[in-house]
Image (cartoon, rainbow, N blue to C red):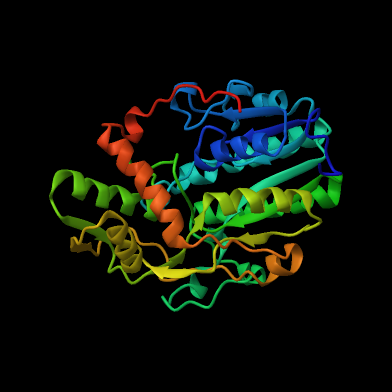
Amino acid sequence: MSALIDRERDLVVVTGAGGFIGGHLVRYLKEQGFSRIRAVDIKPLHAWYQRFLDVDNVVADLRLREPCYAVTEGARWVFNLAADMGGMGFIETHKADCMISVLINTHMLLASRDNGVERYFYSSSACVYPGYRQRDPNVTALKEEDAYPADAEDGYGWEKLFSERMCRHFTEDYGLTTRVARYHNVYGPYGTFDGGREKAPAAICRKVAQAVLSGKHEIEIWGDGEQTRSFMYIDDCLYGTLRIMESDIAYPINLGSSELVSINRLVDIVEAIAGVKLKRRYRLDAPQGVRGRNSDNTRIRAELGWEPSIPLREGLEKTYRWIYDELAAGRTDSIFTRDFVKAA
């Protein structure tokens, strides 16, 4: 049991709990012995990816001030993962929507301060890093200090960077303990895989699965496929998130895999998992993001004696199998429903 919190008695709030990472985080906290969890999301309950009967599930729009005060009442810890976001296809075409998420963090910080929350976690993103450092596929891994001089991803990245600083100043001015992790491309099952908000691993898994199921053995790849990224499996993300929350790390820190891979290589891996070889069509006019991005994990290794280490092949195997089964059963994100997951 953490010395910071009574896992059986103290209330923990998870926002964005109907989404991919948030849903997994609620499950993980339950597994780690947290008994009082309030899960919050703007989506109706039937659209949540994971839901639990023994959790206080709340549907609320946290862009508004009043719901933020209501959901943080009585809470000791807050994990704020709520945001209007998606993959590159979404954030390049919805910059204003992404920026409006600043209201969520603003109101959640104010409510946490006023309601006596002791510790506040904010999920930031590698999109805070400057574009001028990410122009080469053979990118130098990004260190935390590389975020400045600032030139964040337009829209989404600037909102994240601004919100990081807001957390910092709430700590300095009001004494609210805040923790900030910069997530690098989290993937896994029970998340968005179609509809425009999906990220590269889920999109590639879906496209390969569709090719297998349809017998049409070709795949569309956005860009030339030589752009590079690192991808962190959800289990590493969950472990790192809780460790950072419990730690004394008072500054934004990378939480991501350092296993750099090109999009073409990502397709190679998923093809091997599926046992197919597909004809590739490259769409050079599609949103691609930066040319290269990777996580420098020097700081997290020094602070926690750990870094994300689940191999990409291992995580993609689980992700592909889940997405394949969803498509084979005729399910898509647009008709996603689940029965309540029963208490463990």
Q: Position of residue 52 (x, y in %)?
A: 57, 25
Q: Nearer the viewer, residue 275 or 27?
A: 275
153, 328: nearer the viewer: 328
336 lies left or right of 62: left
For the point 26% across and 52% down, the residue is 208
259 left or right, relative to 88: right
Q: Residue at x 61, y 52 (%)?
A: 124
Give the x, y percent position of residue 300. Answer: 69, 65
Rendered position, 256 above or below 292: above
Direction from residue 250 to residue 154 in the image, left or right? left
Q: Image quadrant of residue 16?
A: top right
Give the number of marks: 0
Image quadrant where one finds the C terminus = top right
Judge from the rendering whether residue 118 lies leftward or rightward of residue 276; answer left or right: right
98 is higher (above) or lower (below) than 62: below
Foreground: 224 or 111?
Answer: 224
Horizontal and vertical percent position of residue 266: 35, 63
Q: Say which quadrant the N terminus sits in.
A: top right
* Residue 189 falls in image quadrant: top left
Residue drawn at (70%, 45%) of the image: 121
- Would you say residue 339 is visible in this rendering? yes
- When asked about the image quadrant of residue 151, the answer is bottom right
Residue 123, given in percent of the width and then of the height, sits at: 62, 49
Q: Residue pushed farthest left?
A: 216
Q: Let me know if residue 286 appears in the view.
A: no
Q: Is residue 260 above or below residue 29?
A: below
